[in-house]
Amino acid sequence: MIKEKFSEGDSLLHRLDPRIKIIVALFFSVIIAVTDKYTSLWGALFLAVAAVAVARLRTKELISRLLVVNSFIFLLWLMLPLTFPGEKIYTLASLSVSREGIKYAFLITVKSNSIILVGIALLSTSSIFNLVHALRHLYLPDKLTQLFFFAYRYTQTIHSEYIRINNALKIRGFKPQTNLHTYKTYAYLVGMMLVRSYDRSKRVYDAMLCRGFKGKFWTLNHFVFKKSDFVAGIVMISCIIGLVLLP
Amino acid sequence: MTKRENETVIKITDLSFAYPSRDYVFKKFNFDFFKGERIGLVGPNGSGKTTLFHLIMGLLHPSEGKIEIFGKERKVENDFVEVREKIGLVFQDPDDQLFSPTVAEDIAFGPLNLRKNRQETEKILKETLETLGLAGFEDRITYNLSYGEKRLVSLATVLSMQPEVLLLDEPTAWLDEKTIKRIARILNNNSNLSYVIISHDKKFLKETTNCIYEMRNGEIKIKKK
């Protein structure tokens, strides 16, 4: 099963109303994406690390998530300094490294890491279901919230079908090797997994129709907007505005 | 046959249905179901029992014939919206039925779709869990339940909609005797409920139904009263 590892916890950020968290994360991402001031960006990175610290997440898992993102950024470091036009600071054969290229790659690295860290600290500390409810409460169109929810639900379905088929292989003594039999088996596994999960998702949807589903999710647990949520929201938003105003 | 009340709930006339590139499951099939009836449906595997349920709920559509439910002809998707609010189908495989993370949310899904308010929904939730012996299961995660528990919760998700008619597809398969007895008791205690039960469990059918129909070769016949 796909686990929402970070959503279990009892930190200040875990208890915060998911609506506030979504708004703050969105505000932060937009502001950081458009800022080019170094002081603001360093401040943002500092805030992001602080937020993760407040959420008290396990460092090991946090780093493994950051590695995924930074492996993409690594590709940018390979490309940008060599291809971005600007003042040449180093030349190797016909390739030249530009100062602007390095600057650009560096900006992207700081920005994306800050945004990812804030995303982890604010968003993954809520369960998916709570986020979906929060999006509904924020008046996001039903179609979009449904897409979000079903994408999550059916990733789970595909994953559990995979486990089922994989178990069926295992109990009959399948050992992956480098041969045609293994490739064929894996091809069957993938094919069967997709067909079966499609079927299952259709049956789940049928079952929902049978229980009167008409395209709207009604929520059982309503969020209670506490005073502390309001205060936390104001504090976080002012910190972000403060970032922009830094000299 | 004596009818307790002479109100037809489901009337199927000359219905034909076939799955793509397969032989007809039903050809000129007829079936009447009256309010207050409690029937068991038996028949060999592949005789179309589950297909019949899906046709009644509008999940499948016949190539020919007429389906009347609650006195109105049901043809297109929109006609079945009302049917689904009053007839509850419990699927054979509970993994097809449960989709919410927690038991409470899955059981509340139906009542909320019926636009019950929060107090009502919570009351229904509590009562349903209690009648099924599932009190305290509210916050359990549906995919972590045992198979038997999943089946009970599936039943709860449909009972919570307080349907007039229940269609149960193999409700006792793989359940222990105590749980089967509990389901039989729930069905028997609910005297307003009409239902059709597909089952191979003769003992269970004897306890819960007053008439057995057999399906064979696309036809339905009364086997015994």
Image (spheres, rainbow, N blue to C red):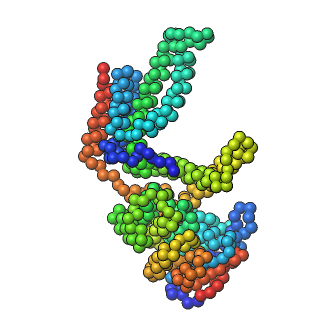
Q: Residue furthest bottom?
A: B2
Image position, residue B18 (x, y; %) = 70, 66
Q: Which residue sits at x=44%, y=48%?
A: A128
Q: Can residue A53 be seen from the camera position used here?
A: yes
x%, y% of residue A106? 46, 22
Quarter occupied by the C terminus of chain B: bottom right
Question: Viewed as shown, does residue A241 lie left or right of A72?
Answer: left
x 63%, y 78%: residue: B42
In the picture, which quadrant includes the N terminus of chain B? bottom right
A199 versus B199 height, above or below: above
Q: How many numbered marks, from 0 up?
A: 0
Residue A27 in view: no
Image point (51%, 34%), residue name: A68
Residue at point 36% right, 32% down? A49
Q: Nearer the viewer, residue B81 or A21?
A: A21
Q: Does residue B168 appear to the left or right of A5 in the view shown?
A: right
- Spot occupied by residue A143 in the image (x, y as percentages of width and height): 49, 49
Q: Quadrant of residue B93?
A: bottom right
Q: Quadrant of residue B109?
A: bottom left
x and y percentages locating residue B67 in the rendered image: 61, 72
